Image (tube, rainbow, N blue to C red):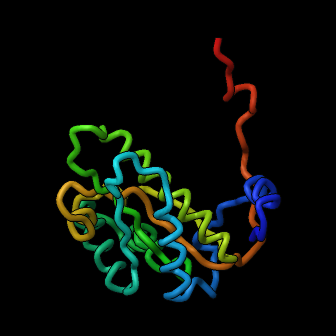
């Protein structure tokens, strides 16, 4: 957690995602989660369209049942072990928030800009969770593209942008490969 602007670069340089299966309690309580989501919403949003929504998953058993129905509908011959693996995320990490991309009608703001805003909300959510002393990660996967799940969680043209797992680290966070600076940055002209 950083307490002043001088520690922000150090925080960003050391930020890591955690694996949901390795997260343990405590996660944020209701007030902390609301504060995290409020900070996440402080994001660039051309036109002030707010093209995103959050779903706080409070009933993990109901969520697991939804995932099981969806997985079996798409994979009717799945074995029990496959179903268990497909829905394992429903029981991981103390807190789960689903970010929805909710495009808004606009003659001035193209959809791709709204999509970028939703992505910025996702990154802010991770930073806000970590600023509150928790670890977080953003995942996608079959759940985010499944029509049964989308229909249960979304309204209208909304889509699932990601699953955000939040908790405390159950083990040290690992560094992952990062791109080479020179391969990713160029100068014009």
- Residue 72, x across and y down, in percent: 26, 67
**Image quarter for residue 127?**
bottom right
State left or right for residue 7 relative to residue 130. right
Of the pair 75 and 51, the residue shown nearer to us: 51
Residue drawn at point x = 35 percent, y = 59 percent = 52
From the viewer's side, name the closer residue of 186 and 143.
186
Q: Position of residue 179 (x, y in %)?
A: 71, 37
Instruction: Quadrant for the C terminus, please.
Output: top right
Viewer-side residue, 96 vs 40: 40
Image quadrant in which the N terminus is located: bottom right
Query: Residue 78, percent across and down?
Result: 32, 65
Please say if 89 is above or below 177.
below
Q: Position of residue 135 (x, y in %)?
A: 65, 71
Residue at the image position 81 percent from the left and 57 percent from the top: 10
Residue 3 shown left or right of residue 90 in the figure: right
Quadrant housing residue 152:
bottom left
Name the outermost residue toward the top.
189
Rendered position, 126 above or below 90: above
What's the residue at 26%, 57% (across, down)? 158
Q: Residue at x 68, y 27 (%)?
A: 185
């Amino acid at each position: 957690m950083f307490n002043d602007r001088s520690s922000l670069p150090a925080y960003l340089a050391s930020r890591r995602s955690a694996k949901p299966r390795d997260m343990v309690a405590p996660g944020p309580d209701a007030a902390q989660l609301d504060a995290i989501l409020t900070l996440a919403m402080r994001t660039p949003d051309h036109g002030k369209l707010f093209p995103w929504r959050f779903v706080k998953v409070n009933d993990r058993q109901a969520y697991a049942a939804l995932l099981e129905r969806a997985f079996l509908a798409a994979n009717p011959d799945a074995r029990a072990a496959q179903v268990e693996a497909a829905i394992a995320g429903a029981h991981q990490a103390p807190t789960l928030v689903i970010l929805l991309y909710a495009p808004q009608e606009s003659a001035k703001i193209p959809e791709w800009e709204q999509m970028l805003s939703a992505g910025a909300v996702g990154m802010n959510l991770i930073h806000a969770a970590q600023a509150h002393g928790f670890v977080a990660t953003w995942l996608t996967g079959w759940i985010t593209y499944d029509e049964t799940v989308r229909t249960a969680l979304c309204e209208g043209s909304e889509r699932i942008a990601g699953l955000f797992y939040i908790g405390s680290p159950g083990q040290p966070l690992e560094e992952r490969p990062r791109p080479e600076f020179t391969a990713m940055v160029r100068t014009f002209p």
